[in-house]
Image (spheres, rainbow, N blue to C red):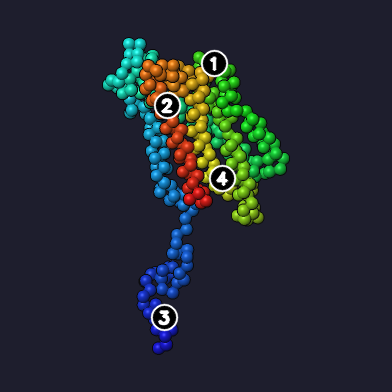
Amino acid sequence: MSDFETAAASELHSATPGLQGEPGAPGQPQTMESATKVRSAAADAWRELRRNALFWIALAIVLVILVMACWPSLFTSADPNSCSLNNQMAGPSAGAPFGYDFQGCNVWAHAVYGTRNSLLIGAGAAILAGVLAMVIGMIAGFFGGWIDAVVSRIVDIVLAIPLLLGAIVLMKRIPSDSQSLRLTALIGILGVLGWTTAARVVRSSVITAKQQDYVSAARMLGAGNGRIMWRHIMPNVLAPFLVIITIALGAFIASEATLSFLGVGLKPPSISWGSDIATARVHMREKITPLAVPSVFLALTVLAFIMLGDAIREAFDPKLR
């Protein structure tokens, strides 16, 4: 028996048995695809996120904030609107671990219940801005030409309006006695004035994606513009879109707190971290906790969403890994 026949026989006997036709069966070709399972971009991103400690810290904070906004009674049994001057600047007690403010309101209860309004306004504005950015950015990037030129000029006009200054001017026209109307107006104003950055990101991603070969192949197979935009281009746009919207959500929460601090956002009896900070700053020399507690809540919330957005960006961008 020649050396070649001996080597072939030994390989045949050492082969792992398998069903006929399977990649692992004797006589079947061993390809790289059979040895390594192909993962999608989302699977690769999730693999990177699982290794990122900052992602888990930010996610834990966000989950606590969401639970606190939906079920504040889990964190405090006190009524935030039950204020009495008899408790003015009182120290910590049962149910009030951080004492009371100048108006005799429970500092901890106010901070906990203020989470709902802040998160509701931030999430609502982010959703509105996201819808506008996705629709306008997709149309401008996909069709190009005069449509892209018109949309780009509209984006420039909106960008020329400072977010806070425009919100202050518009909120001055909203009646102060209707809290639900003011909340809705805040969502609408922040969303309408804050969609431009996300729209630019979507537009640039669409321009890059529509030049790929798979889009040309889909068009040659008879796919219409709607199907190409929805099935082939949008999945490639979602990653950068989600990153910018997650970061924008934190910015919207900070903007709402700023407007309430300035007295043009939510007004009592609606509870807001910004209005609590504005009230407490006057008496900060007498007691610091009414100022510190809502400030820490606001800072942690905004920081958590920014950290979450940065972690998602790093996971989806191979250059940053």
User: From the viewer's perspective, is 153 left or right of 88?
Assistant: right
Q: Which residue is mark 4?
A: 237
Q: Are marks 2 and 4 in contact (CB under 8 Å)?
A: no
First in sequence, mark 4 or 3: give its number.
Answer: 3
User: Quick one: label 1, few (<14), some, or many (20+) residues within 10 Å?
Assistant: few
Residue at 40% in and 19% down: 284
First in sequence, mark 2 or 4: give its number.
Answer: 4
The amino acid type, in three-letter code, at marker 2 is Ser
Q: Are marks 2 and 3 in contact (CB under 8 Å)?
A: no
- For residue 175, which numbered disc appears in the image? 1
Q: Nearer the viewer, residue 239 or 85?
A: 85
First in sequence, mark 1 or 4: give its number.
Answer: 1
Position above or below: 167 against 28: above
Q: Is residue 3 visible?
A: yes
Structural distance between the alpha carbons of marks 2 and 4: 35 Å
First in sequence, mark 2 or 3: give its number.
Answer: 3
Circle 3: element type: helix
Q: Which residue is mark 3?
A: 8
Q: Which residue is mark 2?
A: 295
- Percent across and percent down for residue 37 are 45, 59
The amino acid type, in three-letter code, at marker 4 is Val
Structural distance between the alpha carbons of marks 1 and 4: 39 Å
Circle 1: element type: loop
- Percent across and percent down for residue 163 are 58, 28
Circle 2: element type: helix
Q: Are marks 1 and 4 in contact (CB under 8 Å)?
A: no
- Percent across and percent down for residue 52 are 41, 46
Position above or below: 215 against 14: above
The amino acid type, in three-letter code, at marker 1 is Pro
Structural distance between the alpha carbons of marks 2 and 1: 27 Å
Q: Is residue 231 visible?
A: no
Structural distance between the alpha carbons of marks 3 and 1: 88 Å
